[in-house]
Image: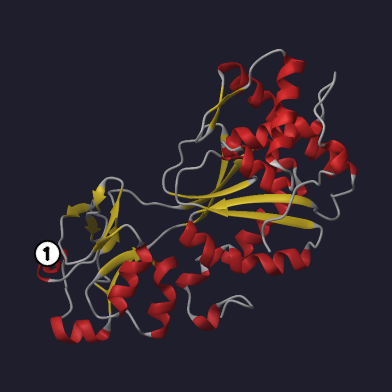
Amino acid sequence: MLRKQQFSLSAKHSCPMSNDLTLIALRLFVDVAATGSFSETARRHGLPPSSVSRHIQGLEQVVGQRMLFRHTRAVTLTEAGSAYCLEVRDLLASLALATEQAQGAASEPRGLLRINAPVAFGRRHIAPLLARYQARYPEVEVELTLIDAYVDPVSEGADITIRIGRLKDSSLTGRRLTAQRYVVCATPDYVSSHGAPQRPQDLLAHNCLLYRGLGGAQKWFFRDGAGVFQAHTLHGNLVSNNAESLVEAALQHQGVVLFPTWLMHEHLASGRLVSLMPDHEAGIDDAIHDIHMIYPENRLRSFKVVSFRDYLIDRIGSPPYWDRSATDLPDGLA
């Protein structure tokens, strides 16, 4: 089980505060701010929602400010609550780090490690690596959240966030994990029936299975040699916002797809799909999209964060294992 509680709350903590702030109330407040939900925060900490609500009410009474707007569908921060949450979140992070260091984690990483990653990448290339990491560091608990929507690592309290594409977070520290390489591919049966495209223009005669994002159906970009990427608007009989659905359609000989090699490598290695137009570098826009690990700067003093960062870099390697042959893979990945 990947999701584990950061701390336990017992029945004696179910009463609201009287005079002083408590760490439990502050932690609950930060979690409610992040999730926008009393019930989700209660579920995470094994409490009834009414107990969470009482702690927050007690916090508001002590501070003398309303911290949250309570709506039927969501809970949002007031202006005072937003400013207070930033300070409290940093305080709790510093406290957790101080506790970790005081417990002697320099020799043995320990504590809760929160990791956030895109769904497909996390499922294929983060989750399978966790068992070996936690066997090496048994005192580290992991909370893995997989989501494709943009996530603010600071507001969500993530220790490490995997992000694909351009980095815009000036307040965060980033480490390039690896380059991302795209491949155009189809099944051998499809190629046998329809021919193999040699140039991007040839794709106009093929059934291109297209991914639809927030900006609509993706264009495919190609360049040869050191040239610039050129956009190509292509067409096919299937458009989807789910990459795996398009991959499955390609495996059923329906058409041609364009996706990163980290998503396609198993099908390419098995021969179920074959790479097309190897002389043309492919992409989904006019820039190279690397894969990064990002984290708030103060997390780099955390031994568990550094240990997982170094472990992930070592396991993925350079070039990444999904771009290497099966005979050149680390143990457990072949």
Asked whether residue 275 is in view, the answer is: no
Residue 36 position in % (x across, y down): 56, 36
- So how many labels did they put on this image? 1
Q: Is 47 left, or right, of 172 in this rendering?
A: right
Quarter of the picture holding the C terminus: bottom right
Quadrant position of residue 29:
top right
Extreme left residue here? 205
Residue nearest the viewer, comparing 113 with 182: 113
Residue 48 position in % (x across, y down): 72, 43
Category of crowding for the residue at label 1, using alpha-carbon neighbours closer than 10 angstroms: few (below 14), some (14–19), many (at least 20)? few
Residue occupying the point 82% across, 32% down: 15
Residue occupying the point 59% across, 38% down: 37
**What residue is pinned by disc 1?**
201
Quadrant position of residue 244:
bottom left
Residue occupying the point 79% across, 39% down: 96
Residue 144 position in % (x across, y down): 62, 55
Quarter of the picture holding the N terminus: bottom right
Residue occupying the point 19% across, 52% down: 231
Looking at numbered disc 1 in the image, what kind of residue is underneath it?
Gln
> Tell me, what colour scheme is on the image?
secondary structure
Residue nearest the viewer, comparing 283 with 124: 124
Residue nearest the viewer, comparing 240 with 247: 240
